[in-house]
Amino acid sequence: MRPRTAAALGAAAGLALPALAPGIAGAHGLQGRADLPIPSWLFGWAAALVLAASFAALATLWPRPRLQKVEERPLFRMPGWIDPVCGALGIAIFVAVVYAGFAGTQEANRNLAPTAVFVIFWVGLAVASILLGDVFRAFNPWRSVALAAAWLARRFGYVRRVRPYPERWGRWPAVLGIVGFAWLELVYVPRPVGPQTVAGLACAYAAIQLVGMYTFGIETWSRRADAFGVYFNLFSRLAIFERRDHTLYVRPPLSGAPPWPALAGSAALLCVAIGTTSFDGFSNGPVWAKLNPDLQSFFKDIGFGTNGALMAAGTVGVAIAIGVISSFYILGIQGMKTVGHGHDARELMGRFAHTLIPIAFAYALAHYFSFLAYNGQAVGYLVSDPLGHGSNIFGTAHATIDYGLLTGATIWYVQVGALIAGHVSGLVLAHDRALAMYPDVKEAARSQYWMLVVMVGFTSLGLWLLSAVNT
Amino acid sequence: MSRGRRLGLIALVVVIAVAGFVIAKSGSNNKDKSATVTETTKAGTKEITSTTTQVAPVPIEVKNAKPVGGVKKITVNKGDPVRFTVHSDVSDEIHVHGYDFHKEVPKGGTVSFDFPAKIDGVFVIELENRGEQIASLEVQP
């Protein structure tokens, strides 16, 4: 079968995923309002646009790689005090959130900790990273503590040799961290996650990071094993701003992605990011509604308690979602392997991993945008009453979430827009990488059909997870 | 511009034009939908459509702290009144998420809700103390 035919069939199959019943309310770890499923007419329109844009892009995109070498322009120098100040701020916020989690009310909606972590940190910082570059790096509390400690050590002439980081570990520790966090948000029972649990885990995570940075060196560890550092850095590569040393540079959008070092576990990181967000949508659908009770009975039969069975079933679900995403990517890579020679599957998986970064962000935005827009407002009153004990530090303790801020239709358009933009961006990155890897123009074109199938599949899945084609 | 490119762009334009027409047409059709009540059970869904403008309150029965007939799904359009009553054989607090309404229901008693659906989205209605969802409120835009 010619690659173009295969690509067309694959794309059609990806789009023809029969959308089943509408999704019901999801909790995201904090209760409130869940999104309405995207109506079928919008789903159909978006899917058609995705296909059209893809084939048009294939026909019209540039003939020579443009993004492989980063073209950046220096903007200005940042003052030297930026890092210590941001670091101190990051540490202060971390301490405040942990304190609130331990000392405050255990009602998740009235305590600062869960909202700060699941909304502002996990979703808000991802959006900030896309817009402003890697802001988390400056505010990273555990990294700041480590940097301060290192500076003090140097002052006192204390020298230590770091151990070499085992290269085969690559980014796998970050992969584990992302899975763990997503598991906490989507599977852990009881839900919503209690403030004390959030605070305790935050401390444990910070401690692990400090040990890692001490053992292997701050930069080496941060760029590979700090799940959140790596995660936000991933999205910052799509941004137009980059900071190196003390200079702020501006560059074309997306161009920070191709230089992303494809260390071991990089493809896995993207698959896990997309897979766990998929589970968020998948767990609200009818397939899971049928599968979940059966899984729970199975686990109960082999001796799990009620909560244990719930969590075990959820774990299986997350594994399935990650498995589906990973297999799709692997299949695409296997197909690409048949094009031309000189590249094995492992190399291809790594060198195309960055093309999934826009898709990962699109999934995250589509699923969590309204969560950020609504539950994010809770910070307004939570900062005044972080412990939920009745204080009113800034006078805003009686504010409420304004659900009238956005209409359901606006949210739909943001979700669909994000998925389409992510799709096109992914295609652009894949196109550029293929041109760089396959000097023969025909081979480059053929290799792209495979990535096209992968992208169309992911985008259609993303739309489907959010939609209600059955009305 | 090569022939392939031109064809690609023309195809794209046609698709977008068609799609734009389709959305504009079907978007307007979405407005007239009457309030529906759907009972979701393991066997399937049974839809009871009331086409009258007077919205009768949806009865929700709670036995043994669980909703009889599964989680009730109440669907209204934004701006319509949401009316339902909860008769419960256990005492608890009924919490409507998003709207953040709380009402105590005594053991064996009935409590009713009547409020305008000002916010669109999907909202959990549950027995707050037991954390048991009894209904799902879906407000269409």
Image (tube, rainbow, N blue to C red):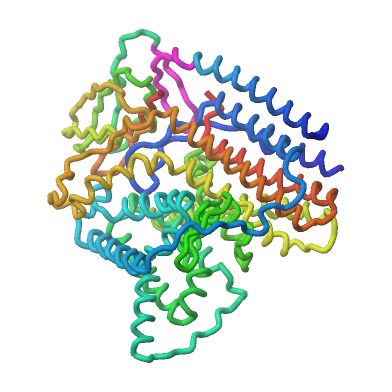
Residue A83 appears in the figure:
yes
Q: Nearer the viewer, residue A84 or A217?
A: A84
Vertical arrangement, residue A71 with respect to residue A206, above or below: above
* Residue A259 image position (x, y, % from top left): 62, 61
Is residue A60 inside the magenta stretch? no
Vertical arrangement, residue A118 with respect to residue A81, above or below: above
Q: Nearer the viewer, residue A444 or A71?
A: A71
Residue B15 in which image quadrant: top right
* Residue A452 image position (x, y, % from top left): 71, 44
- For the N terminus of chain A, give its image quadrant: top right
Vertical arrangement, residue A290 with respect to residue B59, above or below: below
Magenta-colored span: B30-50
Q: Is residue A141 left or right of residue A285?
A: left
Q: Is residue A322 left or right of residue A28?
A: right
Q: Is residue B86 left or right of residue A133?
A: left
Q: Residue at x 37, y 81 (%)?
A: A151
Q: Residue at x 70, y 51 (%)?
A: A432
Q: Residue at x 69, y 32 (%)?
A: A52
Q: Nearer the viewer, residue A438 or A68?
A: A68
Residue A297 appears in the figure:
no
Residue B93 in which image quadrant: top left
Is residue B47 inside the magenta stretch? yes
In this rendering, the count of numbered labels is 0
* Residue A184 image position (x, y, % from top left): 41, 57
* Residue A382 image position (x, y, % from top left): 23, 49
Q: Nearer the viewer, residue A301 or A267?
A: A267
Q: Residue at x 71, y 54 (%)?
A: A433
